[in-house]
Image (cartoon, rainbow, N blue to C red):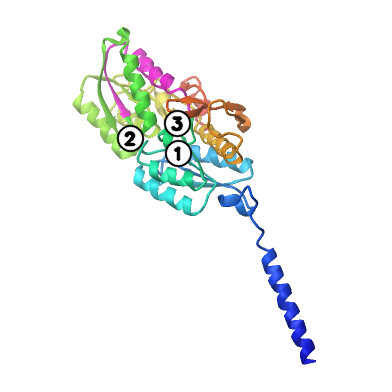
Amino acid sequence: MKKFFTSCLSLLLAVTVMVGCSTQAPKSADNAGSTGGADGGKKRFAIIFKNTGNPYGEKQMEGFKNAIEELGGEAILKAPDQPTAEAQIQMIEELISQKVDAIAIVGNDPDALQPALKKAMDAGIKVLSLDSAVNAQSRMVHINQADPERIGRVQIQAVSEMIGGKGEIAVLSATSQATNQNTWIEWMKKELEDPKYKDIKLVKVAYGDDLRDKSVAETEAFLKSYPDLKGIIAPTTVGIAAAGKVLTDKGLKGKVQLTGLGLPSEMAEYIESGVTPWMYLWNPVDVGYLAGYAADALVKGTITGKVGDKFKAGRLGDKEVIQDGDGTQIMLGDPFKFDSSNIGEWKKVY
């Protein structure tokens, strides 16, 4: 009986070991040493925005999440308290340790993130930037919301029309390291080189760091330092809303014109009141959505980020990778004009 019991116990232990081993499925050759989805679960896609408390960023992350969930993946939404490269680097390191499949980042600095993002790519994580680009060595592809040249030039054209082609103007930007803002401002300056703008003078470019209080303070500084100021361009959703409030509170409607890039929901009151005759933007939900589909295409190997790569971006249709300086990009579309004729409709959307 004792011998029989010992035999049964040995058999039971053997079966237990076999069952235990079978619960850990071996990694396939394709997934060996790869990231988040390697164990057969959902692929994990992370997006890192510039900072928290930014309505534009919240919409962008919403679009990214929508795309990833449509594709059956898991979206990880992250943003630091302050818009600094250091804070984003810490988040990148955390995501590397979590072995996510892809990281999409809205860069707070074009170059400072390179070591961390290169480390991520070396670990097999697909890296792309959106909205505010990191340098070409730090990414596989960039998602561009609209043609940077068109964005920059159209804002000068707008403010020129608003002020009658004559007077002092100022630019209220986001952070001094924001690549998208800096590129747009360079195109603004190139547009101003046209002789037809000879009576317009750009007196100052200031940085509100995409923080409401600082943007308010910079706007007030404009008005104090340049009492003859005729127009303000704010190519940042936080900045233009802050400037709109300052101009409204000081009763400067019609005296200092305001345009730039803003969220319809935040700028509707200023457009309807005439403080901002019109402004521009694209749909930030679509920017994030496109980034989500591009990230998925990178993970699946449908695209590699090379010029000529094509993929389907859900409801946005077919998209193609094109040249972008030393790197590549995927373009969403042209900037869209919001004015009193359409703001009532769009303010309900985003």
Residue 149 lies in quadrant: top left
Along the line of sight, the residue nearer the viewer: 331 or 4: 4
Q: In the shown orientation, is residue 50 left or right of residue 20?
A: left
At numbered mark 1, what does the secondary structure look like: helix, strand or loop?
A: helix
Above or below, comparing residue 332 to residue 160 in the picture: below
Q: Kindly indicate the quadrant of the structure image that contains residue 49.
A: top left
Q: Which mark is residue 139?
A: none
User: The N terminus is located in which quarter?
Assistant: bottom right
Tell me the CA gap for discs 1 and 2. 17 Å
Query: Would residue 170 be counted in the magenta stretch?
Result: yes
Which residue was labeled with disc 1? 57
Tell me residue 290's x, y (percent). Answer: 55, 33
User: Which label's residue is closer to the chain start, 2 or 3?
Assistant: 2
Report if residue 331 lies within the magenta region: no
Q: Nearer the viewer, mark 1 or mark 3?
A: 1
Badge 2 is on which residue? 177
* Range drawn in magenta: 144-172
Residue 192: x percent and y percent? Answer: 31, 14
Q: Quadrant of residue 27?
A: bottom right
**Residue 23 in picture, x, y percent from top left:** 68, 63
| Residue that mark 3 sits on | 263
Q: Nearer the viewer, mark 1 or mark 2?
A: 2
Q: Amino acid at mark 2?
A: Gln
The answer to whether the residues at label 2 and label 3 have Cβ atoms under 8 Å apart is: no
Of 268 and 119, nearer the camera is: 119
Left or right side of 290 for 254: left
The residue type indicated by label 3 comes to Leu
